[in-house]
Amino acid sequence: MTEIQTSSAADRRARLSLRLLAAEDARRVYAAALERLAGPGIVPGGEEARAALLAAGATPVAGSPAAGVAPALALRPDLVEAAAAQAPKQVVLGGRDADGDVVLTPGAALLGAGGRPAPLVEPVAGGPPRDVVLDDVGEACRLADALPDVAVVVGPPVSPPGDEGTQVLALDAAVRATSKHVQVAGVASPRVAATAAQMAAALRGDASAVRRRPPLSLVGGATSFAAAAVFAGAGLPVGALVAAPEASGAVVGPATSPAALTEAVVSFVADVLAANAAVQALAPGAAFVAPVWPAAAGLPAAGPDATTFIVAVTQVLTDAGLPVAAHVFATSAGEPDWLACTDGAFAALSAAAAGVALLTGAGTLRGGEVFSPRELVADAEIHSWCTAVAAGIPVDDETLAVEAIKDVGIGGNFLGQKHTRRHMKDVWRPRLLDRSPWDAWVAEGRLSAADRAAELALTLLAQHEVAPIDEERAATLERIIASAGL
């Protein structure tokens, strides 16, 4: 079994810069998004979003709305820009302990395991996916906890079908099975959000600690805005959209032209800026994370158009001062195969170089319908490779090692140098990619990368233990869940 030797992605920051838009073009896209919000405006996807936009200073657009569509709201550019300036430029996501805290900032390129909770799970050793049960939540989160590349557990990665109570039980299982930050995804119920906020307070012990080191955050689309408002009011970071999908002007089906892709970028940027303005109206200074999902703009979830969309939107929103969480690992592949690798590798490298703060979706197959432990291990390796490339080559006195070279001289040996000992492990090593000679590979059983991923996942699950939550906090969590009435 290959030893885990890769360093945590939290130790790296992208130096490689990928900007698909010229600076002037990025400004024009931003200006077009502001113009769109000023008129024709935006149609909120729910009453909570409408009320929040009105509180942010939006005004109803005169004229008759289309049949079946609520009146649009217009938002002045100065209000949108003031709200963007109000949002923190860096967002802290707290782990259970301080050493598990991470910071979302442009170029951080942190890895999030999971996306929206998957209803199906692939057995660790492979095989047909099956329906998720509650025990799968803990196993998925424990595997994510064991991988040093994973910074945030998203979703949770899996959840059994059920009502609001099931969502709360899945969240409880997640926070017990990982010491890393848990980012709730796809929750629409304010009651579930309120219970989650109480759980966050229980994990931290007091409200001020929750705001300094929030153990939970929430991301979602327009249907999650009401839940996001509850999180923001409790001092927890959020990311949401506000536009009703049927009225957003989103592209329907694959984008087939640059004009269609540009339209999708402008519409989505306008949606995110409006959502932040709405959140800031409800909770001034709230930590806002821009959720970037190509599928929410009517684009394919993976492929060239999706990657181009992520890079362009990230460029504009980062320039506006908002950290981005992008759904990068969104392959339609049904197995951890070449398609999954290709989709993940190109999207992850592009997103990391573009300045995405959090790359989510790791471990998912079939567009997020299936969570695969093998794919999570594979995506972690893909991510570590991509972030190593995006981090570039640091050039400073330490890396140039001029003094060490002088000390060794011509024909000398660097093995005895302190400089060598300090940096001898600063090298990227694969866990799954077998670069051994052909004969050695055959002799070892011709194991594929997927086979090695299964082996590593099984080993990690057998060996990794997550320290339990202390008894007092665990009892408080149990009382919160019992009294929630969900």
Image (tube, grey):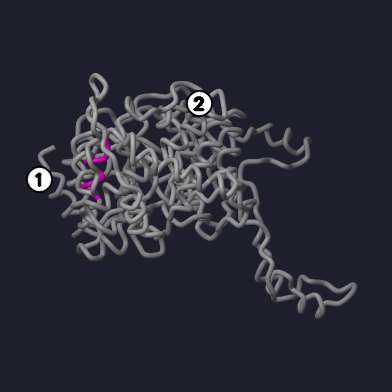
The residue tagged 2 is: 332
**Which-is-in-front pick, marks 1 and 2?**
2
Disc 1 crowd rating (10 Å Cα; few below 14, some 14-19, many 20+) is few
Q: Which residues are magenta?
A: 223-231
Front residue of 419/82: it is 82
Q: Is 18 in the magenta?
A: no
Q: Position of residue 184 (x, y in %)?
A: 31, 43
Q: Position of residue 366 (x, y in %)?
A: 46, 26
Kindly identify the amino acid type of the residue bearing the numbered disc 1: Ser
Residue displayed at 40% across by 32% down: 296
Q: Marks 1 and 2, Cα distance to the nearest angstrom?
A: 40 Å
Q: Is 226 in the magenta?
A: yes
The residue tagged 1 is: 483
Q: Is residue 291 visible?
A: no
Front residue of 27/238: it is 27
Front residue of 18/302: it is 18
Report helix, strand or loop for mark 1.
helix
